[in-house]
Image (cartoon, rainbow, N blue to C red):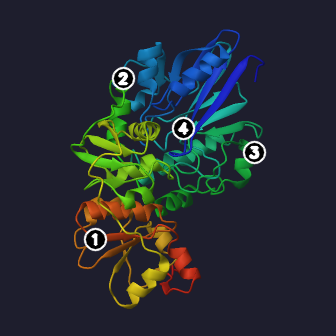
């Protein structure tokens, strides 16, 4: 790229999202591609580089996170560009296949790449790198079932990937998602690649036949992003302004989300509180699956922890936050974690029911004999029928087991999580498991 070109990648490891700044130092202009709702990171980078943000380009209408295009438009006067098939309800500049837009003197060529969504576009920057959004990822391709039927989406995605792989080998690939996102399956944690490397190793590009590609897409089953319909509506609708400051409260009224670590929650929490540690993996996604629609009070260990949680929740469309509390009175409810030795003893006596809260593909690799299976994210709707005996929740490492136990406890069910270790550790120590045998194996 030209000597005056500025390029920065921003990664949200919790959601597996990537966004970008493209700028021209000579003219001082900058464009943000696929911004997060928390726009401060782009503003700070632009100021550091001596740039002004004049435009936002959306590769598509996002379903897994709230976009910051409205804030950039309202707070910084940026114009928003997106393909008309997104059907936005705000004023926008329409993108068209094959057109070239400019950031100062830096050219960005638009390639319409439907599949993940009908409006999806990739952006070729100065013919040296391509921002692939939710089409081509590092190691795989996007899921095609969030906006249209999976078969229809897969057919469009197949043709779009063929277009992208015609770019020269040396063109750098910068995707819209990395590992941790629900918008793809076998995503790599690598933040970038090249067209040549993907052509040689990307599983989606190694399926040359359309029918085989569609069949492969239909064989996958992944959770849909939480609050998906709400997030799509927010991103398509009128510009969303900045959030109100998070208020510190003196007392608690209403639903409580405890964002402290699982051990702190177990030692003492407010009655009816759910626990999703903000320090844990995929906080925002996991919280989005289990909280309801009512305004939330955050129980945090500090103001900083509360602010981090609020930022994550807003990213997945949980915008109704009543405030936060630290060390509130009445946090006297307890949950008693359980280790694998005690679980072994209780199972031998039939004293507990084991609830496996992992996903189906994890359980298929082996599960504790006699255990029941409900993924943690489905417990708010499927917890009826539990509670005849104390329930022990278990996953792989303890994080989801803790969330699940809090959901059950909030419903009056005696629940104890395995917070250290999980089913793989149970198997290694000789505990009885059953392995699911797949067809043909």
| Percent position of residue 276, x then y | 40, 53
Q: Height in image: 363 above or below 135?
A: below
Whole-number angstrom distance, CA of label 1 to CA of label 3: 55 Å
Foreground residue among 76 and 361: 76
Q: Height in image: 160 above or below 435?
A: above
Task: Decide if residue 112 is on the left or right side of residue 266.
Answer: right
Whole-number angstrom distance, CA of label 2 to CA of label 1: 44 Å
Task: Give the residue at mark 4.
Answer: 113
Of the numbered discs 2 and 1, the one sitting upstream in the chain is: 2
Secondary structure under tag 4 reads: loop
Callout 1–callout 3 Cβ contact below 8 Å: no
Whole-number angstrom distance, CA of label 4 to CA of label 3: 19 Å
Residue visible at 76% across and 19% down in the picture: 2
| Percent position of residue 274, x then y | 32, 54
Q: Is residue 424 visible?
A: yes
Whole-number angstrom distance, CA of label 3 to CA of label 2: 39 Å
Whole-number angstrom distance, CA of label 1 to CA of label 4: 50 Å
Foreground residue among 110 and 420: 420
Quarter residue 27 falls in? top right
Residue visible at 64% across and 11% down in the picture: 28
Secondary structure under tag 3 reads: helix
Of the numbered discs 1 and 4, the one sitting upstream in the chain is: 4
Whole-number angstrom distance, CA of label 4 to CA of label 2: 25 Å
Q: Which mark is residue 196?
A: 3
Task: Give the residue at mark 2.
Answer: 239
| Percent position of residue 277, x then y | 44, 52
Eye-nearest disc, 2 or 1? 1
């Amino acid at each position: 790229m030209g000597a005056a070109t500025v390029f920065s990648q921003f990664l949200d490891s919790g959601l597996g999202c990537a966004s970008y700044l493209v700028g021209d130092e000579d003219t001082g202009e900058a464009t943000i591609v696929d911004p997060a709702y928390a726009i401060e990171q782009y503003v700070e980078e632009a100021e550091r580089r001596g740039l002004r943000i004049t435009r936002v380009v959306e590769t598509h209408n996002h379903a897994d996170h709230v976009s910051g295009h409205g804030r950039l438009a309202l707070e910084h006067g940026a114009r928003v560009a997106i393909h008309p098939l997104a059907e936005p309800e705000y004023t926008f500049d329409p993108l068209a296949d094959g057109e070239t837009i400019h950031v100062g003197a830096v050219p960005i060529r638009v390639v319409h790449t439907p599949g993940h969504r009908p409006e999806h576009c990739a952006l070729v920057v100065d013919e040296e790198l391509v921002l692939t959004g939710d089409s081509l990822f590092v190691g795989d391709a996007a899921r095609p079932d969030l906006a249209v039927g999976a078969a229809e989406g897969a057919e469009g995605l197949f043709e779009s990937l063929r277009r992208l792989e015609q770019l020269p080998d040396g063109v750098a690939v910068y995707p819209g998602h990395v590992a941790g996102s629900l918008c793809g399956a076998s995503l790599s944690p690598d933040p970038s690649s090249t067209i040549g490397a993907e052509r040689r190793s990307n599983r989606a590009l190694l399926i040359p036949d359309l029918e085989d590609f569609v069949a492969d897409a239909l064989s996958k089953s992944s959770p849909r992003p939480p609050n998906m319909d709400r997030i799509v509506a927010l991103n398509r609708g009128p510009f969303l302004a900045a959030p109100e400051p998070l208020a510190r409260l003196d007392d608690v009224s209403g639903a409580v989300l405890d964002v402290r670590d699982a051990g702190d929650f177990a030692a003492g929490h407010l009655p009816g509180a759910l626990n999703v540690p903000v320090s844990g993996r995929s906080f925002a996604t996991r919280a989005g699956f289990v909280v309801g629609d009512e305004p939330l009070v955050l129980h945090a260990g500090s103001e900083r922890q509360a602010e981090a949680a609020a930022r994550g929740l807003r990213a997945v469309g949980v915008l109704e936050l009543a405030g936060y509390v630290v060390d509130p009175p009445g946090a006297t409810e307890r949950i008693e974690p359980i280790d694998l030795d005690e679980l072994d003893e209780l199972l031998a006596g039939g004293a507990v029911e084991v609830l496996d809260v992992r996903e189906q593909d994890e359980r298929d690799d082996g599960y504790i004999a006699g255990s029941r299976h409900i993924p943690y994210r489905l417990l708010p709707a499927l917890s009826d029928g539990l509670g005849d005996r104390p329930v022990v929740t278990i996953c792989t490492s303890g994080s989801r087991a803790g969330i699940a136990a809090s959901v059950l406890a909030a419903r009056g069910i005696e629940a104890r999580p395995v917070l250290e270790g999980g089913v793989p550790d149970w198997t290694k120590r000789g505990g009885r498991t059953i392995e699911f045998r797949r067809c043909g194996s």
